[in-house]
Image (spheres, coloured by chain):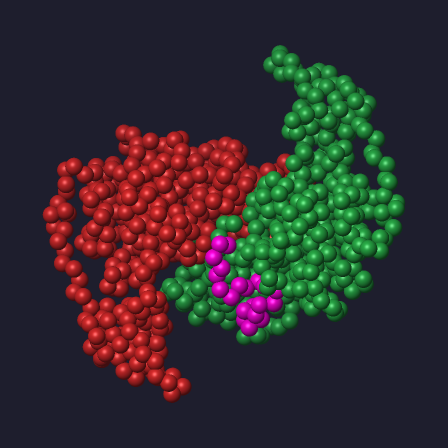
Chain colours: A green, B red
Amino acid sequence: MRVEEFLKQKGIEVGDYVRIIKVEDGEKVEYEGIVMPPYELSEGDTVVIKLDNGYNIGIAIEKIQEINVIEKAKAKPEVHFKAELEPRKELPTITILGTGGTIASRIDYETGAVYPAFTAEELAKAVPEIFEIANIKPKLLFNIFSEDMKPKHWIEIAHETAKALNSGNEGVVIAHGTDTMGYTAAALSFMLRNLTKPVVLVGAQRSSDRPSSDAAMNLICATRMAVSDAAEVMVVMHGETSDTYCLAHRGTKVRKMHTSRRDAFRSINDIPIAKIWSDGKIEFLRDDYRKRSEGEVWVDDKLEEKVALVKVYPGMSAELIDFLVDKGYKGIVIEGTGLGHTPSDLIPSIKRAVDEGVAVCMTSQCLYGRVNLNVYATGRKLLKAGVIPCEDMLPETAYVKLMWVLGHTNDLREAKKMMLTNYAGEITPYTKPNTFLI
Amino acid sequence: MRVEEFLKQKGIEVGDYVRIIKVEDGEKVEYEGIVMPPYELSEGDTVVIKLDNGYNIGIAIEKIQEINVIEKAKAKPEVHFKAELEPRKELPTITILGTGGTIASRIDYETGAVYPAFTAEELAKAVPEIFEIANIKPKLLFNIFSEDMKPKHWIEIAHETAKALNSGNEGVVIAHGTDTMGYTAAALSFMLRNLTKPVVLVGAQRSSDRPSSDAAMNLICATRMAVSDAAEVMVVMHGETSDTYCLAHRGTKVRKMHTSRRDAFRSINDIPIAKIWSDGKIEFLRDDYRKRSEGEVWVDDKLEEKVALVKVYPGMSAELIDFLVDKGYKGIVIEGTGLGHTPSDLIPSIKRAVDEGVAVCMTSQCLYGRVNLNVYATGRKLLKAGVIPCEDMLPETAYVKLMWVLGHTNDLREAKKMMLTNYAGEITPYTKPNTFLI
């Protein structure tokens, strides 16, 4: 029996506080907690409740002997924000673009209710603090999991962002799923030209129906960065597992480094732009960030989509490279080993790719550090084959950048020049200390 | 003119201390230093010398006005180790297998001389300390860059290791290039069954002709671990950039996380087995490692080579999955986003792969954390398509393991069962705190 039906039969709603008596192996166990939305954690036959200690537990329907409501779900708090939603002259105005993901879909973690998308009122209910920082103009662009984000979505986000920035907003916050947030941040970093105001991507690692959700604090910190003087594309997420501070990472240097921790996002080979403390203070960690200024932002959205990102490994067959060339790919970003190597027997296929006009770029699967094709013989052979060494660029950033570069030129020399030009902080000119595993 | 000829003409040998007068744009500059082996850093027309400050500089031959020997290379120290090379009864005996890489080829960093492979005498000259720890039996297996390591090499190393362990050696040290050392460590972890003695992979991040080489200390620490009571496959490398200690990492949980730092190797989602302090003390960081025992080690070397490791990314085309299935691949390890997702439009191709008998396994490109396909809709669809979620296994480890698993069975249910069986510490049953970015 599906859990929705089961709950309906019993007259139980999501958010109700219930007592469940479960029977297993002849033994009775009793649980009390709030009924969670069924479709996040269960496979359809499990009732999930949030226990008083904050943990969720799933109980198979067939093992439930008894389920009783102790307290009905609290009525959702009335929306008392009409006044605040009127623009307050003393506050800057920002736009929040919704694209989907955990943060946009489950913002109300008090009641456990799940929203497929947010409106201004829903935001207010969940995180009223942001209305003390700025006047908020929310706009839902789409509602997709970030693993389904495609170049066409990047382009749409870029245009909406520029439009907002060019029409009186002081900044833009983009609520986004975390899975591919780094890729989107990189894409916006290259596409938004003459960026004069902050663009902040924000997400949540823990869905809002979990007591440990990071959605609210991340959104508050993102809003603060959006009215700051940092005119960069940034990712704002928790800096530690506790709620001490968030970090604002440069969009081209950030990567999701953990599947589930709240502080999963990390700057790689670079230091973050700022700490946003939970008391609201912004502490800039560097002074070389791009400053807020005047001027129209424009979108350079030419992307070549026939680009692939390929991680190499021992035993890999060259046929995978050949296939991409045969299929008409215009660019290949290789995630090589160490300083930027591949098995030697891939080199003829790589050379053939370059000879046929495919831009082949080298990054490292180490992630930290910098490729250097001059040190070892394999690297020099790759250089000779025409591979473009991408300095300390992240593989994901190099992939997005190559799409953007090849949207502008088919000439390999020009493409190489562009790949090695620092457009948005994607290349650090020298390796900074204290950026490894931090 | 090639640099070898040039040096020969001038009567200069590698290791000579020289003074060079260079002329550029009419200006004379003078350098003094030790002549380095030409084939590491120059393209054939550059003389590389190590300056007194330890840095290397390359000077183009055509700009060299004058080059003079100030001091001839020190004669290589005589081998006075005959006595030591006679087995000392009070010491355990280990075998050191050479496979290539920086550590094996350039062990003599005092003179700058480069060895393509090492013998006992060469080791002794460079790192005599190891002969105080054990009687050393060196054996050169092959001499290749580790990016060229293939499954057949893993198999050869496994057999040589088992042979050594079963014939009186207390442990085996394997000198290996660092690029793919993690993959080889994983392969040996699965192939060496009933492991009763230590197997230690060791490499060097900095070539021995650099003053900052880590080769000597790594080799000393590796030798110490090889006579310890930890009967595991381990990687021993620097734990910090300074020479304070090395770390012994479990072979299935270790990854090269930096292109060039001496402390590049890190345990992911797990704590290392031990610290080896520079004073020789071994500090075990956990007590659940496999202990030295009696019994024959055997090699289970059945590997299915038609396995691919595929990192997914936004905009990726499903044709890459289709291609692998069409080409007869038997297994695909996906490096998914976040908790283990792919773009939704890959799922039909993934389902087709499974339906045609291909084992498709899910890992995360976050590297840290654990895949969980139960949380979000995309994950559940992947589960339903038959994807095997690989817990907290590294993508590289899952790739090697899947080759090994498919060497034993073609049955997908059996393959799933084996992938989720913990053979060599590749799965940690629960996520340990203090293992993120450490």
Is A373 drawn above or below residue A437 in the view shown? below
Q: Dividing the image into 4 quarters, which one contains the N terminus of chain B?
A: bottom left
Is there any visible trace of residue B338 in the rendered image?
no
- Residue at the bottom extreme of this rendering: B26
Q: Quadrant of residue A233?
A: bottom right
Is A234 drawn above or below residue B415 in the view shown? below
* Principal secondary structure, stretch drawn in magenta: loop
Drawn side of residue B128 relative to residue B318, left or right: left
**x%, y% of residue A353?**
51, 67
Drawn side of residue A151 relative to residue A76, left or right: left
**x%, y% of residue B391?**
53, 37
Drawn side of residue A400 relative to residue B280, left or right: right
- Residue at the left extreme of this rendering: B83
Is B31 drawn above or below residue A436 in the view shown? below
Q: Which residues are magenta?
A: A415-435
**x%, y% of residue B359?**
53, 41
Q: Residue at x 76, y 42 (%)?
A: A127
- Residue at the top extreme of this rendering: A26
Q: Residue at x 79, y 48 (%)?
A: A131
Q: Nearer the viewer, residue A159 or A88?
A: A88
Q: Residue at x 24, y 63 (%)?
A: B111
Q: Residue at x 72, y 51 (%)?
A: A223
Give the mark count. 0
Is there any visible trace of residue A104 in the rendered image?
yes
